[in-house]
Amino acid sequence: MMMGDVVLHPASLRPPTNRGGPGADPSNATTRPSWALLDFSAFVLDRRNSTTATCTFTRGNKKEIQLQVTFVVAHPPNVSYFCVYCHGLAASAYSMEPQIIATEADLVLLRLVLGGRSARSSHSAQELFVYKAGGPQGQPPPSLEQIPRLSGRFLGIWGGGEPVGLLKLHDDTAEYIVAALCDDDKSQFEVCLFHSKDKVWTTRPVAVPRRDDDDDDSFRHETTTVITVGGERGTMAFVDLWRGILLYDVLAGDDDDPTPPRCVPLPETIFGTPCYSVNPLIYRDIAVVNGQFKYVEMGSEVTADKASRGPMIAAHSMPIASCRQEEDASWRRDCKIDVSKIRDDKNLLSPEVQRMLSYDERMTKPEPTLETLCTGHPTLCLHDEDTVYFTTMAKPMSPKACVVAVNIRERTIQGVARFGARTRGINFTFIRSRIYSYLNMTPEVRKSVGFKKKTKGTKVMEFGLAIPRF
């Protein structure tokens, strides 16, 4: 098949051989991961297993296209991934890698942009789909459905569109809501909602409260990530990781009388003045873990005499219940650690870093530590509030990376996994997802087909666990 003007990263057209690893049997619900680190950019491959779902959609030229989505599971700190394939389309038809732009429980919201290079940022070129995991023993099977695009808005991850969130309404129904907080150049905000029952987008203007540090002219809030808090009011947290959190009750009020959002500040930083032009996800993360907001940041501490000390990691927590009223919201610092104090008692990091270096570099460079490596992109664990995952590289702008699991309370490295990023340097490349606790995974072998030839690097099981050959 002719490749034409391909926009996709070359690595996106072949299955990764540096993901996954042997572990507990994923077909056993008691040992498979209840959540996973998930690369939010797809690999464009015809890969099939028991998680595969398909649907047919029609583009503007009335041509019917069959879309296929498949998930491949790995235990953290390995990064799981997913594959997207449009039957009959060349790689040059994709404007960018298909992306996951929201995930909650058994649902995943996907964005597909077709039309080649010229359609990369066109809101009218995006197609949106919701994947739903299948039930036990494959009943019902996984499903995939297209939903309407939001007119005039390009939805996506931070820096690539308007971040959105998913709210599942009831465990015993398939109903859900997609929510986005949008603004215009005049700091006027509206909440855009898509209800799966009605199949239409609606908008609600919202009066956003001012923060104490806002200037006289405008309120600034650039949503970095959207967190589903849930509850009977269907609370969504629209988080600006530089400025603060806006809590909005989706199920309270209505389009004519919407409930105003509540503003919750972030913990006071110890790392100097925020750099608003930089993606905060390189340095900060927030999640809901065991009924609490957990927040982590890293950087160089600015001391009282204006000196710089670091790199440092600080973690904070706040019960969700205390956020229901703004005056009750207060953060507790759980720990602050010097990265140089993190121990690697099991010698997990050095062997993986050696793989990233040339022979001469291995002979001349000192024993690697998190302090001496390029480290960032902290990602909180969803089941252990003391564990944080970091992306680390031996050299700046390297495509070779590791994901390192660190117990920040005990200051120890717990695990290391190779990760071949499709960006250069530390960047935001993966998210958390609980979809893996809902996927039906049964062990059968199926082959994977790319655009040019079958790839021999990885054996793929039907349940999606990738087992690399060494």
Image (cartoon, rainbow, N blue to C red):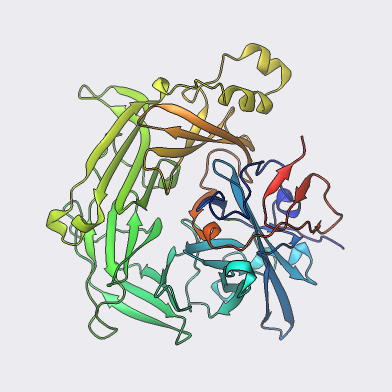
Residue shown at the point (40%, 71%) measured from the top left:
179
Left-right relation of 22 to 105:
right
**Residue 22 appears at what percent x and percent y?**
66, 41
Say which quarter of the image contains residue 298: top left
In which quarter of the view is residue 183 placed?
A: bottom left
Most foreground residue, 55 or 151 = 55
> Compared to 198, does 294 lie above or below?
above
Instruction: Write down the quadrant of residue 408 in the picture.
Output: top left
Can you give x and y, in whole percent of width and height, for residue 345 in the image? 49, 20
Name the quadrant of the C terminus: top right
Q: Residue at x 75, y 54 (%)?
A: 13
Residue placed farthest to the left in the image?
327
Q: Residue at x 25, y 77 (%)?
A: 252
Q: Is there any visible trace of residue 181 in the rendered image?
A: yes
> Position of 407 compared to 114: left or right?
left
Please say whether residue 266 is visible from this viewpoint. no
Identify the residue shown where x is 57% and y is 38%: 425
Q: Is residue 228 left or right of residue 248?
A: right
Coordinates of residue 304 in the picture (x, y in percent) = 20, 24
Is 38 drawn above or below residue 256 in the view shown? Answer: above
Query: How far across and down, in percent of the image, does residue 318 sit?
Result: 24, 48
Q: In this orientation, which residue lies closer to the viewer: 295 or 398?
A: 295
- Quick one: 291 or 201, which is closer to the camera? 291
Q: Work out whether residue 29 or residue 42 is closer to the camera in this orientation and state it.
A: 29
Left or right: residue 350 versus residue 105 is right
